[in-house]
């Protein structure tokens, strides 16, 4: 076994349980496959191992494929990204606002994310729903913000894109992706995943409980749809990586459009393009996406400046594929060291930034003395100031925090940047 392989093995095996579900991992650099291997079990009952041919649900990594389908339809002259969605979905209510195809693709439409609504996973996720029944979960809700003014991740928007693909192509979403996207890229073992069909080498879905692993709850494909309904293998993802690099389906100019950060109406940009997240890591240009549905987790990241791609597919619900990819990136890439220049905290700043900031998933708490930040309701880090309104976390220097939208009351928004991921939260109380 090569030194590289043994080091990758050690890193991966430290992240997965012994005799439990696991991951499939690939590392590709300069067109060469440096590593491609499965770890752990695809099926716990039969103790079948994960291989590069094991099929996993990829969750929200479906979104780059949906965006690709929309751009193919654009090339065929069937739509423009500037089209208002009413042109293609005349019955969908837009609450008096003009929502465009671009807004849907870049998560700037303001359409509420139905999967984060209270009770969705318990009451709706397992049920088969028509498109009309699915959109009934969110179309009556007011927009979270005016289109184009903010970024707000929305599975709802990507479900609307799936219906538009169907309306314009005359094919089901799954058939269009299979024939127009997967097939030209050589992805012969990728599927629109649903519970009923027999899919060869499909991994079981598992989640950790206090007493061990159990099957993850079923989620209907009619709910994940074009926002998270696809499944693939490590081998097929390698074909996808090659097709992107060789510009087999989308040319360089089109891919560059996909990798361009969306610009909001006030001129600010967000780290999302057309179906791709663009969050840099160690100041390097990374094009990536993560995905997660019950029992499956996935990460696909391209370090563009290094011509290196990292792929992680897992049948462990909630598995941190991005975290594993981050550790592997330090093994195979000569990433620059972080350089932070701590400064003395401005004594007037704590009163302006302390308090609770909310986003849909959870709250971010800044201590009254601005010395600590609590993320995800559990993890508390110590803040180290580097600029007047910017900090990093002492326990994890890759986590950077900045404050925005200052007014007479103080700062009203916090931006948290982690490896391959970022989010903003708005202040709700002092």
Image (cartoon, rainbow, N blue to C red):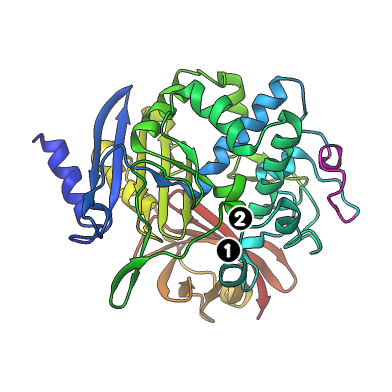
Query: Could you tell me which residue is drawn at 45 percent across and 22 percent down?
Result: 243
Q: Which residue is at 33% across, 41% downward?
A: 336
Asked if labels 2 and 1 touch by Cβ distance under 8 angstroms, the answer is: yes
In the image, residue 148 above or below residue 425: above
The magenta stretch is: 84-95
Does residue 220 appear in this view?
A: yes
The vertical placement of 369 against 32, above or below, is below
Is 90 inside the magenta-drawn segment?
A: yes
Could you say which is closer to the camera, residue 284 or residue 52? 52
Q: Residue at x 71, y 29 (%)?
A: 169
- Asked if the magenta segment contains residue 322, the reply would be no
Q: Which residue is mark 2?
A: 223
Residue 138, numbered circle: none
Secondary structure found at label 1: loop
Q: Is residue 232 left or right of residue 92?
A: left
| Quadrant where the C terminus is found in the figure | bottom right
358 to 70, vertically: above or below:
below
- Quadrant position of the N terminus in the picture: top left
**Local crowd size for mark 2, using a 10 Å CA cut-off: few (<14), some (14–19), many (≥20):** many
Quarter where residue 428 is shown: bottom right
* x then y, percent, for residue 340: 40, 53
Figure label count: 2
Secondary structure mostly taken by the magenta-highlighted segment of the chain: loop
User: For the residue carrying disc 1, how many other residues have a C-alpha within 10 Å: few (<14), some (14-19), or many (20+)?
Assistant: some
Left or right position of 406 against 382: right
Sequence-earlier tag: 1 or 2: 1
Q: Which mark is residue 125?
A: 1
- Would residue 107 be visible to someone looking at this image? no
Cα–Cα gap, marks 1 and 2: 6 Å
Q: Camera-side residue: 341 or 291? A: 291
Relative to the observer, which residue lies in front, 380 or 386?
A: 380
């Amino acid at each position: 076994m090569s030194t590289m392989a043994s080091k990758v093995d050690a890193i991966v095996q430290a992240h997965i349980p012994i005799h439990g579900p696991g991951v499939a991992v690939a590392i590709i650099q300069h067109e060469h496959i440096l590593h491609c291997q499965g770890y752990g079990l695809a099926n716990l009952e039969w103790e079948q191992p994960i291989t590069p041919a094991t099929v996993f649900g990829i969750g929200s990594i479906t979104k780059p494929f949906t965006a690709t389908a929309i751009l193919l339809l654009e090339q065929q002259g069937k739509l423009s990204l500037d089209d208002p969605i009413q042109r293609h979905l005349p019955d969908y209510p837009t609450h008096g606002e003009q929502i465009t195809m671009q807004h849907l693709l870049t998560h700037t439409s303001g359409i509420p994310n139905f999967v984060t609504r209270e009770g969705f996973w318990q009451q709706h996720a397992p049920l088969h729903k028509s498109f009309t029944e699915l959109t009934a979960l969110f179309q009556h809700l007011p927009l979270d913000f005016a289109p184009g003014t903010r970024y707000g991740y929305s599975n709802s928007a990507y479900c609307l894109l799936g219906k538009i693909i169907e309306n314009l192509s005359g094919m089901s979403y799954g058939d269009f992706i299979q024939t127009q996207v997967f097939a030209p890229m050589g992805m012969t073992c990728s599927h629109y995943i649903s519970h009923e069909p027999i899919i060869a080498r499909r991994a079981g879905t598992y989640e950790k409980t206090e007493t061990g692993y159990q099957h993850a709850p079923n989620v209907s494909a009619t709910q994940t749809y074009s926002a998270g309904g696809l499944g693939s293998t490590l081998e097929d993802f390698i074909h996808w990586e090659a097709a992107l690099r060789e510009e087999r389906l989308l040319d360089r100019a089109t891919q560059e459009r996909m990798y361009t950060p969306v610009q909001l109406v006030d001129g600010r940009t967000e780290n999302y393009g057309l179906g791709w997240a663009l969050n840099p890591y160690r100041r390097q240009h990374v094009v990536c996406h993560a995905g997660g549905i019950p029992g499956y987790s996935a990460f696909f990241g391209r370090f563009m400046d290094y011509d290196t791609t990292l792929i992680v597919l897992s049948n462990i619900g909630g598995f941190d594929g991005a975290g594993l990819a981050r550790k592997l990136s330090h093994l195979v890439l000569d990433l620059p060291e972080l350089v932070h220049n701590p400064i003395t905290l401005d004594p007037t700043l704590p009163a302006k930034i302390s308090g609770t900031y909310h986003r849909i998933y959870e709250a971010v708490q800044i201590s009254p003395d601005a010395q600590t930040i609590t993320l995800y309701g559990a993890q508390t880090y110590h803040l180290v100031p580097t600029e007047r309104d910017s900090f990093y976390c002492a326990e994890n220097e890759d986590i950077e925090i900045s404050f925005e939208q200052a007014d007479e009351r103080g700062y009203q928004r916090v931006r948290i940047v982690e490896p391959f991921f970022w989010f903003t939260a708005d202040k709700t109380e002092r």
